[in-house]
Amino acid sequence: MDDLNEVYNELIMEHSMNSPYKKKLDKSDFCELGHNPNCGDEISIEVQLDGNIIKDMAFSGHGCAISQASTSVMIETLRGKTIEEAREIIQTFIDMIKREIVDEKELERLEDAIAFKNISNMPARVKCALLAWHTMEEILNKNGK
Amino acid sequence: MNIEEIRKDFPIFENKNIAYLDSGATTQKPNAVIDTVNEYYKNENANIHRGAYSLSMETTMKYEETRAKIAKFINAKFPEEIVFNKNATEGLNLVAYSYGLDNLKQDDEVVISIMEHHSNLVPWQYVTKKTNSKLKYIYMNENYELSKEEIERKITEKTKIVAITHVSNVLGTINDIKSIVKYAHKKGAVVVVDASQSIPHMKIDVQDLNADFLVFSGHKMLAPLGIGILYGKRELLNKMNPFLMGGDMIEYVYEDKTTYAPLPNKFEAGTQNVEGVIGLGAAIDYIEKIGYDNIKKIEDEVVEYALDKLTKLNYLEMYVTPNKENHSSVISFNIKGVHPHDLASILDTFGVCVRSGNHCAQPLLRSMGLDSTCRASFYFYNTKADVDKLIQGLDKAYSMFKKYIK
């Protein structure tokens, strides 16, 4: 039961139920739909750039608390970062969830997204946590940045 | 029949402290089945229909005896009306391809219900598109049931095939197959029945139902994974082309042509799942030993207890017909504002195994305005204690989420 409260912690619950980023942007450069056909989660991510900087992001769609919170926290973390920094953060997050990082120091760049660390103890939920991050990775890859 | 005694027949309940409420996905296996399969590999294993040696002959006999046992179990007229395959999905595909593709013509209609599992939906979508025929749906009423009026509105003279589930894997609704078959026959259609969710719980008599085809999976009725049954009326199966082709389904093969083996081998190409067949035979023996009357009695008591307890949770939404006589052992539910996937994860920490998602029935859920549900499905080894654990988990989930639910 301790595990449960570590996964569904205050930060994750707040972001999943009351995210400030669940909205439409007035204007966006990229929009990509990520979905997980097994559980029906669908998340659409919008990105607005200012040169090399991620100026703003927002999301819409539906899914479980983990996927919703993970999307919201990802947006909070990546806003204002350069594309290069964003790539590094995304990779670090994916590695953390897949338990491929041993150096705790590396995780510092994740800021609040570190709250998802314990998801790696729940294999059934790893996909939920990664959905938005893979979708964002896709956006950056597709657009050659 | 003592439930504690029954549970002792299922080793997983000795080994794992779980409230297993996912029998609609697959059932746990009794020692009677596990030991039979074990024994088969220790003493009987050989490829059937091929060897001239006694080991292969004996195994072939056992395989064919099991076919006869299954025929008797569902009251088929002839053993060769029983075709072994992988699962209900394969059985439905066989009928869709070998009967549907060859018999449907432009403007013919295939009628299915909105509560079909994808396995009784996607194949019909495919063959109706291929043959330029139409796919029509029987929709539900507010009780999650198929009304007589709606059934008779959709099945017409144009209908050539009606494919319908006996019990919904999401709602637990029991459909009145006998009446549907009667009406469809009057209109000249053949009827395919998906009995996957019914045969574990209730006696199936194919002659009484007068179904033209009926399919089910062994693993949902205590047997090993990977064994399924297609029942088809002999005169229909005889007229149909084979589905899969290769070894053992032939008579003579020349460079440019082949003649096919008679039933049932015509539909059993390649080395068969003998372990599964023999395991299914043991599962049927076990079900008959317990008896459908006892199975129903035990399940009714636990399901009624569950419905009663769940109804009292004012935060819970349930998708169940109020007509108890039309409801089997499946209960779908949601906590408003809590995603079913989160709910299932939380229940898992209480040792409660439920399924969450769309249950391979996306059109059904969409028609209900839902993306997904949690589903608890019961079998005769479940107890009221399992229900109590479920309730405990639900209360915990609600208490975790309630302050955030808008």
Image: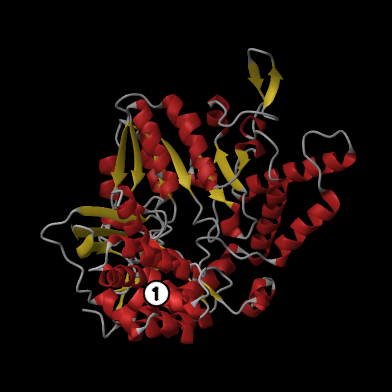
Q: Looking at the image, which is closer to me, B384 or B117?
A: B117
> What's the amino acid at mark 1?
Leu
At x 26%, y 76%, the residue is A17
* Furthest residue in direction top, as rendered: B256
Above or below for A4 versus B156: below
Question: A71 above or below B360?
Answer: below
At 30% from the left and 31% from the top, the residue drawn is B157
Picture coordinates of residue B123 (x, y %)? 42, 39
Q: Residue furthest right?
A: B53
- Residue at 53 percent across and 65 percent down: it is B23
| Front one among B4 and B13 | B13
Farthest left residue in view: A26
Color scheme of the displayed model: secondary structure
Residue B32: give x, y in percent of width and height. Answer: 73, 63
Residue A67 position in % (x across, y down): 34, 67
One can see residue A9 in this view: yes
Based on the displayed image, in which of its 4 quarters is residue B369 positioned? bottom left
Tag 1's secondary structure? helix
**Is B63 in front, or is B233?**
B63
Asked where in the image residue B333 lies, by quadrant, the reply is bottom left
The answer to whether residue B301 is seen in the rendering is: no
Asked if residue B165 is positioned above or below residue A121 in the image, the reply reads: above
Residue B321 spot, x, y in % from top left: 33, 65
Q: Disc 1 marks which residue?
A: B343
Q: Chain of mark 1?
A: B
Count all numbered tags in the image, as a single digit.
Answer: 1
Give the left or right position of residue A34, taking residue B21 as reference.
left
- Horizontal relation, residue B323 to residue B384: left or right: left
Crowd rating for badge 1 (residues with CA inside 10 Å; few <14, some 14–19, many 20+): many
* Residue displayed at 32% across by 29% down: B133
